[in-house]
Amino acid sequence: MDAAGVLDEIGEGARTDLTVGEHVMAIVLPSGSQGAYAEQIVVPVESVVRVPAGASDVEASTLPMNGLTARLALDLLALKPGQTLAVTGAAGCCGGYVVQLAKVDGLRVVADASDKDEQLVHDLGADIVVRRGDDVADRILATVPGGVDALVDGAVQNALVLPAVRDGGQIAAVRPFAGETVRGITVHQVLVASYLREQGKLDRLRQLVEDGAVTLRVAGSFPAEQAPEAHRILEAGGTRGRLVLEF
Ligand SMILES: NC(=O)c1ccc[n+]([C@@H]2O[C@H](COP(=O)([O-])OP(=O)(O)OC[C@H]3O[C@@H](n4cnc5c(N)ncnc54)[C@H](OP(=O)(O)O)[C@@H]3O)[C@@H](O)[C@H]2O)c1
């Protein structure tokens, strides 16, 4: 669902200040096609912005889908500066961007990490890092008595994370939420396809990379012919950052 490369052609009537030959990145909806798994793709003009200055196409291609997912999750929660957000899966692509964008928004962030990812999640900007696991809600509650205002469940732990959220608080679920909600907690379903044409938000992410507030993380890049190997690595779990195929 994301791509970066050289802008080949601009459709007739498209309103854009982009020019042919520029390096651009895009969010790509794979409905009925192979999405970004192609040498050439055609996307709506609102799905495309310039790559961040200084970033390679490989680096830039890791941003659009997960960056916009993180932005959407935070927009749905609509917290105010100073409120407290918990993030599970914080070392992951989506969770990592949630941590970084939440700090830009002025939120206090409690994030989970394994022992080996603790420094990484601190470096992303989390104010408090708790050990990940099925008991993550207990650990969050121990640091924020009464519970956090909201939680983004990047690790897809569903009902396990509910106890970490205060009465009347909110959860942003990146997969359909499995479980009953309790204590007036609202669960928002995050569907990044709804931000397919949010060019301004994608361009803001570009700016934040250039400002150093958002980090591009490449786990590895492969020639397209090695896609099966990339998928095997992805399925084995534990990748930090995004795997990229080069066409
Ligand atoms: N709804 C949407 O529009 C949308 C958009 C983007 C992403 N997503 C979904 O968001 C999820 C995260 O995506 P991603 O790209 O960030 O994946 P990712 O980079 O693999 O990150 C997931 C993180 O969660 C950790 N994790 C997995 N299971 C866990 C558990 N039981 N307890 C604690 N931590 C656990 C992973 O650790 P390990 O690597 O060690 O397992 C990893 O650090 C995926 O399910 C993806 O499909 C949804």
Image (cartoon, grey):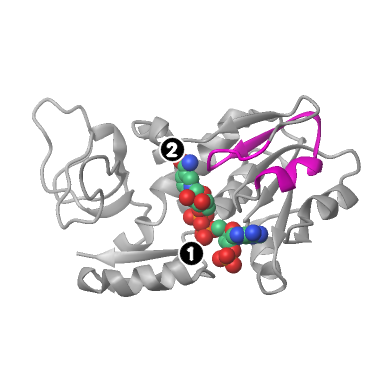
- Residue 135 placed where, x, y %? 79, 57
Q: Is residue 233 magenta?
A: no
In this rendering, position of residue 30 left or right of residue 92: left
Circle 2 is placed at which residue position? 192
Residue 168: image quadrant is: top right
Identify the residue at horizontal 64%, vertical 31% (top origin): 187
> Quick check: 6 above or below 242?
above
Q: Earlier in the sequence, mark 1 or mark 2?
A: 2
Query: Is any part of residue 122 visible from this angle?
Result: yes
**Mark 1, residue position:** 241
Q: Residue at x 59, y 36 (%)?
A: 74
How many dots with numbers? Answer: 2
Residue most toward the front? 179
Q: Quadrant of ligand 1?
A: bottom right
SS for callout 1: loop
Q: Residues within 10 Å of mark 1 (few under 14, many from 20)?
A: some
**Vertical order, 132 against 23 (above or below):** below
Query: Tag 2, which secondary structure?
Result: helix
Amino acid of disc 1:
Gly
Image coords of residue 239 (percent x, y) = 50, 69
Can you give x and y, in whole percent of width and height, for residue 133 in the image? 73, 61
Residue plotted at (67% across, 36% down): 171
Magenta segment, which residues? 158-179
